[in-house]
């Protein structure tokens, strides 16, 4: 519902361009996923997902549009993500 467009990248390919102190973190449910958001505006531009704890899910809508012009989008059932993920593997 937040309009998040996931772009999963390996942690070694992710580089935060702002000070980590500008972020807040919350966890819920199992506590595995690390949800990070801007302390000032509340935008959730990236997080460490439970489904990929060794990677980072970047909200592609927070990136420069020119950098993602060729990005292909696939539908994914986020409500039942565990079953949807199992079908991809």
Image: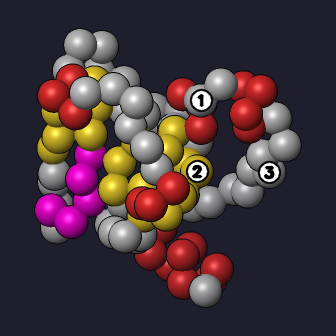
- Residue under label 1: 63
- Residue under label 2: 7
Q: Regarding mark 1 in the picture, which secondary structure is present there?
A: loop
Q: Position of residue 42 (x, y in %)?
A: 29, 21
Circle 1 crowding by C-alpha within 10 Å: few under 14, some 14–19, many from 20: few
Q: Nearer the viewer, residue 25 or 81?
A: 25
Looking at the rendering, which quadrant does residue 89 occupy? bottom right
Assign the magenta stretch its main secondary structure: loop
Residue 63 counted in the magenta span:
no
- The residue shown at (42%, 60%) is 11
The magenta-colored residue range is: 31-35
Q: Nearer the viewer, residue 20 or 85?
A: 20
Question: Rounded to the nearest whole Å, what is the CA distance between mark 3 and mark 1?
Answer: 15 Å
Most extreme residue toward the right is 70
Q: Are marks 2 and 1 in contact (CB under 8 Å)?
A: yes
Question: Rounded to the nearest whole Å, what is the CA distance between mark 2 and mark 3?
Answer: 10 Å
Does residue 41 lie above or below 3 as drawn?
above
| Residue 36 shows up from this direction | yes
The circle drawn on residue 72 is 3
- Left or right side of 34 for 28: left
| Residue 78 shows up from this direction | no
């Amino acid at each position: 519902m937040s309009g998040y467009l996931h772009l999963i990248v390996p942690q070694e390919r992710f580089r935060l361009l702002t000070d980590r102190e500008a972020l807040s973190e919350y966890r819920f449910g199992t506590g595995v996923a690390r949800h990070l958001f801007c302390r000032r505006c509340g935008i959730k531009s990236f997080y460490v997902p439970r489904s990929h704890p060794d990677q980072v899910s970047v909200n592609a809508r927070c990136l420069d549009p020119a950098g993602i012009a060729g990005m292909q989008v696939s539908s994914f059932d986020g409500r039942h993500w565990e079953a949807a993920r199992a079908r991809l593997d």
